[in-house]
Image (spheres, grey):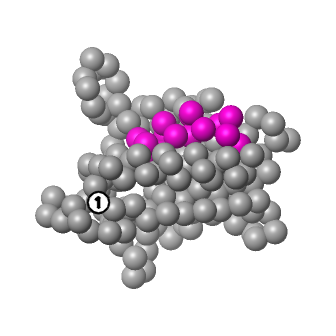
Amino acid sequence: MGTNGSTMLEPHEPLRQALPPIDPSTVAGSASCALPARYEAVGGARKFTRSTLTQWGLAECFDDVALVVSELVTNALRHALPADTPRETEVPVRLHLMRWTGRLVCAVRDPSDESPVAREGDDFGAESGRGLFLVESFADSWGWHPLSGAIHGKVVWALFRLQHAD
């Protein structure tokens, strides 16, 4: 996969302006799941991803996509939830998978308005802090945008170009 880095969308720009069109006639599939505010949710996100990709005939993409999903969900749980969020709280984070003929998008919605921050790449011996570096390394592009209106938070997304598609 390639790296194009992060793209931050202006608050008034919808997610669809940076991603493939959301015209219902062009979307080949979409699925989403709510994730509780517990680290066990990362395993649930991987299971959901495996099941969805298998249903879509994209099981061969699972390893790379699951790694990115794991990092995005972990970052949302670790950095985007307020410290006083009860870990029994349901639905603070939501995983969305969307596919088009030649692209797959993983998007994670969380309640924080803070932008994701990639750490400097000079400490590769650290046990944590490389999540966005991994996302950038495995996805073709990634980015984020703040949510507006009644829903607070942001969406962090990663795009994969599908090899077998045109």
Picture layout, residue 4 above or below residue 95? above
Please tell me whether residue 61 belongs to the stretch shown in magenta: yes
Residue at point 39%, 48% (across, down): 42
Q: Residue furthest right?
A: 166
What kind of secondary structure does the magenta stretch mostly adopt?
Answer: helix
**In the shown orientation, is residue 46 left or right of residue 16?**
left
State which quarter of the image contains the N terminus. top right
Residue at point 76%, 34% (across, down): 163
Residue at point 56%, 34% (across, down): 64
> Where does residue 37 sit, x and y in percent of width and height?
29, 60
Picture layout, residue 69 above or below residue 33? above
Residue 16 in view, yes or no:
yes
**Badge 1 local density, few (<14 within 10 Å), some, or many (20+)?**
many
Span colored in magenta = 58-73
> Where does residue 89 sit, x and y in percent of width and height?
26, 68
Picture layout, residue 125 above or below residue 63? above
Q: Residue furthest left?
A: 84
Total marks drawn? 1
Residue at point 28%, 55% (across, down): 38
Q: Secondary structure at mark 1?
A: loop
> Where does residue 101 sit, x and y in percent of width and height?
79, 51
> Where does residue 118 sit, x and y in percent of width and height?
35, 38
Q: Which residue is mark 1?
A: 37
Picture layout, residue 26 above or below residue 119? below
State which quarter of the image contains the C terminus. top right
Residue 143 in view, yes or no:
no
Hey, what amino acid is under mark 1? Ala
Please tell me whether residue 28 belongs to the stretch shown in magenta: no
